[in-house]
Image (cartoon, rainbow, N blue to C red):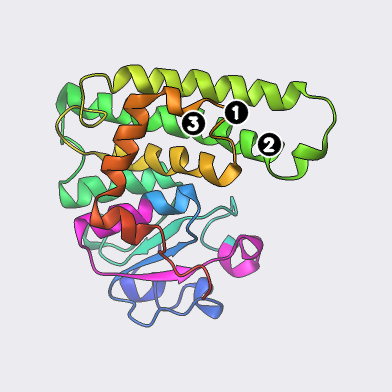
Amino acid sequence: MLDSKSNLVADHPINARWTADNPDVLQLYSFPTPNGIKVSAMVEEIGIDYEAHTVKLNETTTPEFLSLNPNNKIPAIIDPDGPDGEALSLFESGAILIYLADKTGRFLAKDGAERYETIQWLMFQMGGVGPMFGQLGFFYKFAGADIEDPRPRQRYIDETKRLLNVLNQRLEGRTWIMGDEYTIADMAIWPWIRTLDFYGANEAVELDSFTNVKAWVARALDRPASQAALNIPDRDA
C-alpha cells in the first residue's frame, strides 16, 4: 500500500495501459469470464461507483497488469477508499468479494456462524468448482480435447458431477445457498455453473439431473445485477 489515494490510483503503473478516468472511484480490472463475472455481479449488486477496465486474457502478463497482480489473473481492483480511508489494491476474486461485502455490510454476515458458513461455500468454489470446472473446459472444449487418452477428460467429468451433486443437495429446500438470503457464495458459484454450457458439457455432466442447481442458477440470472455482470467489462473494448 502506498501513502495516498492519489499515489495508488492515479500514479499506479497500471495506468500506463489502463488509465483511470476517475481515480476517486473503485477501479475494476477484469474480463467477463466466470471469475470476472463474480466481482462484476458484486459491484452491480452493491451499487458502488466504479470504473471497469477490460483486461483481455492475453494482457494479463504485461508489466502494467503484473504491477497490480503478480499472479497475472483477472480480476483485480484498486479502491481509493479502502480500510481506514487508505487506498487498497487487491487481487483474487474470493478476497475481493469478502472485502466488498465487509466494506458495504451486504451479502455476508458481519460475524457469527453464518459468516463462516458463507465463507465455507465461497471456498468450495475457490478450491473445488473453479479449478475442477476449468480443467473440464480444457479437456472437453479446448486444447486438451485433442488428447486421445480419455482418462483426463473423464476424471474432470466425474469430479464436476460430484461437485454438482454436493451443491444440488445443499440447495434442497433452499432458495439460495445460505437459505433465504443471496450472498457472495451464490455470486461466486453460479457463473461457473453457467460456463458448463459454454464448454458444451451440459450433457456430459448430466446437468439436467441436478434440478435444484438448475433452478437456482435461473433465479440468480433473473437478478438485474447478474444480467449486467455478464457484459462487464465490455469484452470488445
Judged from this view, the residue extending furthest toward the right is: 148
Question: Mark 2 highlights which residue?
Answer: 140
Q: Could you tell me the amino acid type at mark 3?
A: Val
Quadrant (top left, top right, bottom left, bottom right) of the N terminus: bottom left
Dot 3 or dot 2: first in sequence order is: 3
> Residue 142's spot in the image, x, y percent?
71, 45
**125 or 203: nearer the viewer:** 203
Identity of the residue drawn at 40% across and 24% down: 210
Query: Does residue 36 lie above or below 80 as drawn?
Result: above
For the record, the magenta segment spans 39-65
What number is the disc on residue 129? 3
Dot 1 or dot 2: first in sequence order is: 2
Give the quarter of the image for residue 57: bottom right
Judged from this view, the residue extending furthest toward the bottom is: 21
Element marked by disc 3: helix
What number is the disc on residue 204? 1
